[in-house]
Image (cartoon, rainbow, N blue to C red):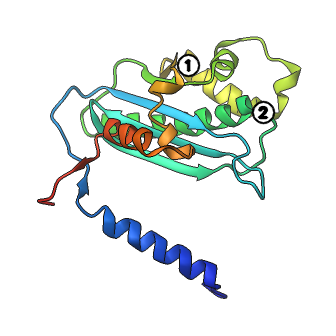
Amino acid sequence: MHEPLPKHFYLLKRLLRYIKGTLHFGLPITKTDLVLKSFSDADWAGDPITRKSTTGFCSFLGTTLISWTVKKQNTVSRSSTESEYRALAALTSDIIWLRRLLTDFGIPQNYPTNLYCDNMSAIALANNPVFHSRTKHVEIDQKFVRDNIQQHHIILHPLSTKDQIADIFTKSLSTPRFQELRSKLTIVSDTSI
């Protein structure tokens, strides 16, 4: 904003073109069960300059998308497991907030929220009660996620990369894959919007 360069104008124009081209897309709210489920993903060192990873996650209430986040992580992760684990911790915090909000709305979540992750090492780390010296750099996130598993706020499930909806937030995708994941997010094209 203080010193705009030609590349900033190019990016702004690109963003405005994207918005103009997607005005007819919408996010329907459907009447379904009111069970919360979430998907977490992260790339690893995806920013070519800072080598910071990107966290992406989304939550559904039944089949309706109600929350999503894409954010560059604050620190550089030393492994893909670490970047995925930081994404799990961020999503766990979001799930706790959503569960409290839903309870305030009279929709208590009586069961742990299903949280899907495609990184088996991150899932193993969350479920392993033995703390390893190699993971001291993610100790706080590890304890936070494990505590919420033990308190039955969340339950971690493995997921194949093919079924990972949150990939749309963290990866460059081919057009068919992007369209497939967009439809899984329940974003639909409606010319009457």
Residue receiving disc 1: 149
Dividing the image into 4 quarters, which one contains the N terminus?
bottom right
Q: Residue at x 24, y 53 (%)?
A: 26
Residue receiving disc 2: 79
User: Which quadrant of the view contains residue 60?
Assistant: top left
User: Which quadrant of the view contains residue 21?
Assistant: bottom left
Q: Which mark is residue 44?
A: none
Q: Amino acid at mark 1?
A: Ile
Q: Nearer the viewer, mark 2 or mark 1?
A: 2
What secondary structure is marked by label 2?
loop
Q: How much space separates mark 2 and mark 1, taking CA atoms?
A: 23 Å
User: Which quadrant of the view contains residue 118?
Assistant: top right
Is 145 situated above or below 60? above
Describe residue 20's horizontal placement relative to residue 9 as left or right: left
Is 72 situated above or below 97? below
Q: Residue at x 82, y 37 (%)?
A: 78
**Local crowd at mark 1 within 10 Å, few (<14), some, or many (≥20)?**
some
- In this view of the protein, which residue sits in the foreground, 75 or 13? 13
**Local crowd at mark 2 within 10 Å, few (<14), some, or many (≥20)?**
few
Place of residue 169 in the rendered image (x, y in percent of width and height, measured from the top left): 51, 45
Place of residue 55 in the rendered image (x, y in percent of width and height, measured from the top left): 59, 44
What secondary structure is marked by label 1?
helix
- In this view of the protein, which residue sits in the foreground, 190 or 70? 190
Place of residue 106 in the rendered image (x, y in percent of width and height, measured from the top left): 24, 34
- In this view of the protein, which residue sits in the foreground, 171 or 58? 171
